[in-house]
Amino acid sequence: VTAPGFTGSSLDRADALREDSTALETARADPRAKLLRLDGLEPEIDGDGRLLWDDLSAAPAGAELVLLGLEAGEPRFAAWHPDAPPGARSPALFHKLGLMPFGEASTYAGARSVLDWLTRHRFCANCGRPAEIFRAGWGRKCPSCGAQHFPRTDPVVIMVAEHRGRALLGRQPMFPPGRYSALAGYLEPGESIEEAVAREIREEAGIRVRDVRYVASQPWPFPSALMIACVARAENDDIRIDSRELEDAMWVDREGVRRALADDPAAPFLPPPPYAIARTLLTAWAEGA
Ligand SMILES: [Zn+2]
């Protein structure tokens, strides 16, 4: 399986520095230290789709510096400001993501998710009082009750059900015209990955599956999902969609999927974008996964 989008960052996360105040001070004073240039939470990129970096002096007054990690030993930070609004998703953002090498998008995804988490989780979930930032931005702790809180990652299963050489694909009303993709849904407390895959396919399309196999995973920083891609064997093929979740669903054979991935105008659907793991999953399935 080829590496999915939003993976392959060149940064060393340098976890050991996060709670070492002396090392953090040294990193902040390092003349090679750089600050990720963002427009709100959107990336700023050059003509090759690479992230842009400024000196730390570019951080606005009152901002907290989040240690993203080390690039070949050089500190890399992002600035979080208490006035920051929660992250939005614009068409321009997704256009930029399409131009970015996956490793650059991976560095961006980590920064975006942790900055957005700091904005969305200002208060202690245990007692409701304001919580302070610690661990160089990778956590909050509550001065009132002592609880510690860490940036969340929400698991999502995304999967292809397979029946006699055909893959089950669906489309949501929000998709661009013609696009179909793998079905997906949040994993719930008390479920295994395999159980979540089976439940989502049954709920959304009325298909029963067994033999769930893991294929690959990717972070999806909107705001903080982990996409877990799987293939499962379908026991029936009579689709009954849940119209609250899906606008349509259909079976597509390998040739149809290969045509879609090759941008063939005669393909039965338009595929998901390259940075989405649905594309990785369909590519793996078309190649026999
Ligand atoms: Zn508390």
Image: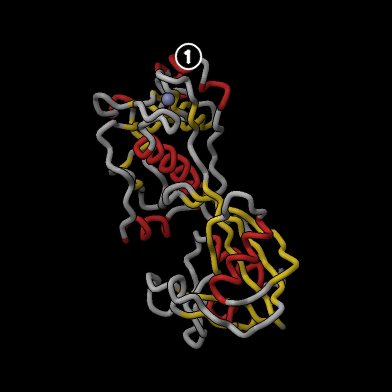
Using the rendered image of the protein, determine whether residue 223 is visible from the camera's viewpoint.
yes
Nearest the camera: 161 or 103? 161
How many badges with numbers are in the image? 1
Horizontal side of residue 57 vs 270, given as left or right: left
Q: Is residue 153 above or below residue 253?
A: above
Residue 115: image location, x then y, percent: 39, 37
Residue 7: image location, x then y, percent: 55, 49
Q: Quadrant of residue 253?
A: bottom right
Q: Is residue 212 above or below residue 10?
A: below
Q: Which quadrant contains ligand 1? A: top left
* Residue drawn at 50 percent across, 33 percent down: 150
Nearest the camera: 106 or 154? 154
* Residue drawn at 47 percent across, 32 percent down: 68
Q: Classify the position of the N terminus by image quarter.
A: bottom right
Residue 42: image location, x then y, percent: 33, 47
Nearest the camera: 59 or 115? 115
Q: Residue at label 1?
A: 21
Secondary structure beneath label 1: helix
Q: Is residue 279 above or below residue 25?
A: below
Residue kind at label 1, given as amino acid type: Ser
Using the rendered image of the protein, determine whether residue 44 is visible from the camera's viewpoint.
no
Horizontal side of residue 140 vs 37, given as left or right: right
Callout 1 crowding tier (Cα within 10 Å): few <14, some 14–19, many ≥20: few
Furthest residue toward bottom: 266
Residue 60: image location, x then y, percent: 25, 28
Q: Is residue 243 above or below residue 126?
A: below
Horizontal side of residue 46 vs 14, given as left or right: left
